[in-house]
Amino acid sequence: MKFSLLQQSYMNRRSGSFRGASAPLDSSTDNTIKSPAAIFWLVLHGLCCLISLLLGFRFSRLVFFFLFSTSTTTTLYVTAPFRPLTETTAISSPLTNSVNDLPVRIPVINKTVSSSSRVVVGRHGIRIRPWPHPNPSEVMKAHQIIETVQREQRVQFGVKSPRTLIVVTPTYVRTFQTLHLTGVMHSLMLLPYDVVWIVVEAGGVTNETASIIAKSGVKTRHIGFNQKMPNSWEGRHRLETKMRLRALRVVREEKMDGIVMFADDSNMHSMELFDEIQNVKWFGAVSVGIIAHSGVEENLPNPAMPVQGPACNASNKLVGWHTFNSLPYEGKSAVYIDDRATVLPRKLEWAGFVLNSRLLWKEAEDKPEWVKDFDLVGENIESPLALLKDPFMVEPLGSCGRQVLLWWLRVEARADSKFPPGWIIDPPLEITVPSKRTPWPDAPPELPSSEKITINQEQTVKRSSKTRSPRSKRRSKRKHEAKLVETQVSARRSEQN
Amino acid sequence: MRTCLWVFVVVLVFGLGDGKRAEQRVRTERISGSAGDVLEDDPVGRLKVYVYELPSKYNKKLLQKDPRCLTHMFAAEIFMHRFLLSSPVRTLNPDEADWFYTPIYPTCDLTPMGLPLPFKSPRMMRSAIQLISSNWPYWNRTEGADHFFVVPHDFGACFHYQEEKAVERGILPLLQRATLVQTFGQRNHARQIPLDNPRSIFVYFRGLFYDVNNDPEGGYYARGARAAVWENFKNNPLFDISTDHPKTYYEDMQRAIFCLCPLGWAPWSPRLVEAVVFGCIPVIIADDIVLPFADAIPWEEIGVFVAEEDVPNLDTILTSIPPEVILRKQRLLANPSMKRAMLFPQPAQPGDAFHQILNGLARKLPHDRTVYLKPGQNILNWTAGPVGDLKPW
């Protein structure tokens, strides 16, 4: 009876893996002889359990082995548990307690089983090295390995012969221009392909825009368009179309070779988009997610994000287009650029189309016949589909339009919003009002009035240097000044504290 | 007492219906020389296997009693039997057979939790051998040296799940001249998921480090190696190791460069197969392990072997491998014949694990002259072994 209990206890404890126990109580279950020794060990086991109950941890049964080892125990194979300690490794056990320190001193009782295997059965130490942190040069090597592997992967799985990307972006100077243009610029900087970025600016070439795109590191063409951007969305869409056509004319005249895509400055592009459009042959379309931001909370019938793009049937052939349904917004959409109402996209946005630049050339060898000549296309076209005689020759990309690869968004500041040119505050602001709820102590202790003014100025310069620190690489002189100021301020602060 | 060698002839897995890759532009490399060609050998015509007719209490009745045997980790023994029954290498004439197979399912004795109990297996095996030796003359002719048995389970034909006890018992004395195929297989394991994500994880591992139920103090489980991995590298950002069971386990393996395959209670692990199938370089931390088809596949060129005592220096070892070597290993792993050799597809396909087992058996032919015993010569001791094993089954 006791025997089956023991068996049962083993069954219960074996939840998923097996135990390499070395306890003397591990009487084999096929040993049916109940020797007095077995009963003795059972009693000892019970005693052990009681003691563990009292003390709250499990005794290692090796304690008992150590104290009471007899020759009748045939099931033992505990051997040389620990390798000798060396200076470079330390041995520790996570759940160690004072009793378990005893096994360290157990002498070798039985020899290792066979001489051919150097594997030792039994309890081993857990080797932990004394300095746990990774070596930084090894971390660098690991990253280089990862880079090498990824490069190899790209060679194998990526595009075989990548073509140059010609990116057309219409823009104009406004408060949010830096925000939007930097986003597009960063996306382009990450690409492993050659990029020619044609930036067409309404209102002529300005230093503002030029300074932003100069940081891109890609080849840029900055073209000025001598019309000011109107204040209405309708006017803006029309002007942007003209600007894009202007850029396409440059592509045509200079016979640029590559894939033309339209990256509006406030859109967000995913990296997969650029990989996918390398697959285009002549004219392709991708699905664009429309984020029609509504300033006012409305209950729209369909809360899902609308998607514009090619529509395919079951055999992956282009059958039509998903366009933006503007009916729910009838009369409630934004008219002026700074309206708080929803800004609506066109039926089909330019951003969702890509074309092979050879379509625009005067003569190209295998230019298909379903493309109109660029000179014959007017200026008031809605979407690049007007360049084609047969819109059904468009190639749907991104698994036939099922993948949304970019998002359309229009967010602009109020018409009266002002921003410091180049986002540099120069000269330092003259009148400042300390805010009431800053986390740092507002006013330093009372000082003579002249010093107070300079402190205020330095505080604001410090704050502005913080805001422009990510972009202040070019302004090294100012950085030095800011640094000096900062150290002065911090010195003063430390004195105060 | 003979040591129980971890003869690890095959490590396998069921793959169900691979998804076909659209374009195989993967750069693969063939293992040059005899090793690589071995995987493409066709065993048909090179050997003949005779399958004994055992009463159904050894095989079918066990299955009927517990159909879980078809889907648990050691179901390979059943599927190997089915494969042999319909394979062209099977012969119905025992006189011309090179190898003899005994269709017995020793691991089909499952607990309510689904774990196999090996306690009755020695007796079952012994009674089967008594049956074949008395009904056919082929066992006595060679005392089993041209017979092979499929013995999946942690420690194979030692028939015990605890390492020390298994070592102490040794291989069943009656099987000491026979060839043992130790393998395991699992259904729905390593389903093929086509994915081209860039490999961004440096080292990946999911599994237990401490077995708190059976070995709370540590030191027994995995001989302390898994615990050492955890303690040394749990804070290292290059090592993505944890005890999670994520749903994206296979996808994560495809995003990793190295996959750790440390020993557990036994040195083999399904991780090796998963790593090979998903192209992740296996880092094998198990002293004295014998890997599948070790006579044919040059595992040192495919995986990385780390001694258990070198585990604290694992990051140094892995980062000091030159990138060209890593790329070469990945190319070797991308070879489709390597992946095929690791899997037990249903139905069997050429080049798969079933065929590799037969290839391995064919490589052991022709039998040595000493295999055949002179009349009256007896090598095996029929009464050896623990007393409990001698009871009839």
Image: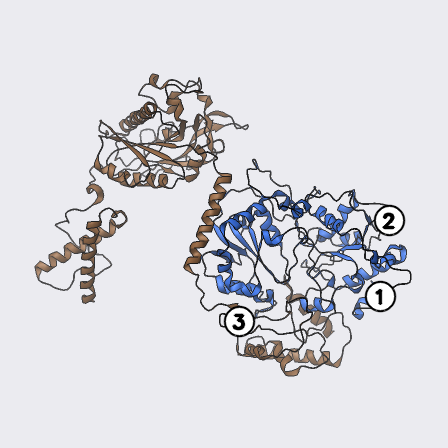
Chain colours: A brown, B blue
**Residue at point 20%, 45% (across, down):** A424
Q: Mark 1 or mark 3: which is in front? A: 1
* Circle 1 chain: B
Q: Which residue in the protein does label 2 denote?
A: B94
The quarter of the picture where the N terminus of chain A appears is bottom right
Residue found at the very far front of the displayed protein: B33
Q: Position of residue A487 (x, y in %)?
A: 20, 60
The quarter of the picture where the C terminus of chain A appears is bottom left
The answer to whether one can see residue A110 in this image is: yes
The answer to whether one can see residue B14 in this image is: no
* Circle 3 chain: A
Are both tags, 1 and 3, on one chain? no
Residue A203 placement, left or right of A190? left
Q: Which residue in the protein does label 1 denote?
A: B382
Crowding at dot 2, Cα within 10 Å, few <14 / some 14-19 / many 20+, comes out as some
Using the image as rendered, state which of residue A481 and residue B364 is in the foreground: B364
Q: Position of residue A429 (x, y in %)?
A: 14, 49
Q: Position of residue B103 (x, y in %)?
A: 79, 52
Residue A98 placement, left or right of A270? right
Are both tags, 3 and 2, on one chain? no
Q: Which residue in the protein does label 3 denote?
A: A93
Q: Does dot 2 land on a helix, a strand or a loop?
A: helix
Q: Does dot 3 land on a helix, a strand or a loop?
A: loop
Q: Does dot 1 land on a helix, a strand or a loop?
A: loop
Q: Is the C-beta separation of discs 1 and 3 under 8 Å?
A: no
Residue found at the very far right of the displayed protein: B375
Q: Quadrant of residue B193?
A: top right
Q: Quadrant of residue B88?
A: top right
Crowding at dot 1, Cα within 10 Å, few <14 / some 14-19 / many 20+, comes out as few
> Which amino acid type corresponds to the residue marked 2 in the rendered image?
Pro
